Amino acid sequence: MDYNKLITKKNILITGGAGFIGSHLVKHFTLKYPNYKIINFDILSYASDISRLNTIENNKNYNFIKGDINDTHLLNEVFQKFKIDSVINLAAESHVDNSIKNPYKFAETNIMGTLNLLNISNKFWQKKSNNLFYHISTDEVYGELGKKGLFSESTSYNPKSPYSASKASSDHLTTAFYHTFKLPIIISNCSNNYGPDQHSEKLIPLTIKKIIDNEKIPIYGDGKNIRDWIFVKDHVDAIDTIFHSNMIGETFNVGGDNEINNLDLVKKIIEITDNKLDRKPNTSIDLISFIEDRKGHDFRYAIDNTKINNKLGWYPKTNFKFGLEETIESYLSES
């Protein structure tokens, strides 16, 4: 571990810190860096769960504030009170289906909320140094791939859903504040995350819960859409690495090197879960139910990790089967 990280004091605002990725990140930073003051700012929407952070709620370097990133008055108070010098922005509406039903909500949070954070950061950090606005985004901003190719940091943006369009907008705003106001920023775009404590609307926890409850497992279209999956703890490790890299103005893609189509993924989850439930192999295979495809459903996402590999020495560590087993065990322990 870098000794300088242990002695340096930082006051970090982590937005969306009670969400899936955010809660893992908040725990990681709070426990690993006792000299950092971590301020978790979350609106506690349906996908957030503050109980994910029960194990650190009494830590001296941890504070939780319930709030909306569009609340300028509250954010001004937080920046003033805690002398915020760094922001890691994870606050976002993130479920594609919901963005199709209510795109306005996604624009409000993902675009206007990010703009509000950028404005306030820029105001408070005038004539100051050692600041960072780290914006976490998604590979979905790039659109879709065919059967070959990978998304690199130079891939043109081509968002296809209201969700990915809102995240693309927030990425562009973040970059604009760097070029226009010299705000120190970094952006990372990650592939699909999985792991313990994810909201049940997402494919992997939804599938696990359906198997446990012996209910139909919905799969869009023919199930051939391909995603790259990264274990959430690997993503948190990448965020830590990027945050401390001092690579101001840069963008990094972060992937898990685990490409698999949705149908094969569900079959793999069935195999592992049935085994852990002491069921006969493929007992739950008949639960698979193909449903009408999602509107604008991108065919394939896949990340090129070359830049973060070469510049920062980061690689995903978690074997996909091991990560799935840990994830499945966490949901079985709750059932």
Image (cartoon, grey):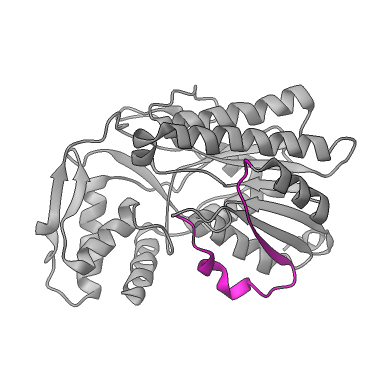
Answer with left or right where residue 48 lies relative to residue 226: right
Q: Position of residue 95 (x, y in %)?
A: 40, 43
Q: Position of residue 34 (x, y in %)?
A: 75, 68
* Residue 76 belongs to magenta span: no
Eyeballing the image, is 18 above or below 333? above
Answer with left or right where residue 103 lies relative to residue 315: left
Which residue occupies 44% across, 23% down?
158
Eyeballing the image, is 54 above or below 112? below
Which residue occupies 88% across, 40% down?
128
Splitting the image into 4 quarters, where does residue 10 fall?
bottom right
Answer with left or right where residue 176 lies relative to residue 48: right
Which residue occupies 72% across, 50% down?
244
Q: Position of residue 140 (x, y in %)?
A: 43, 34
Which residue occupies 51% across, 59% down?
233
Residue that lies at the very extreme toward the front in this rendered image: 73
Query: Can you say which quadrant of the picture contains the C terminus?
Result: bottom left
Residue that lies at the very extreme toward the left in this rendered image: 286
Q: Position of residue 210 (x, y in %)?
A: 22, 61
Splitting the image into 4 quarters, where does residue 217 fall?
bottom left
Query: Can you say which quadrant of the picture contains the N terminus?
Result: bottom right
Magenta residues span: 47-70
Residue 150 appears in the picture as rendered: no
* Residue 63 belongs to magenta span: yes
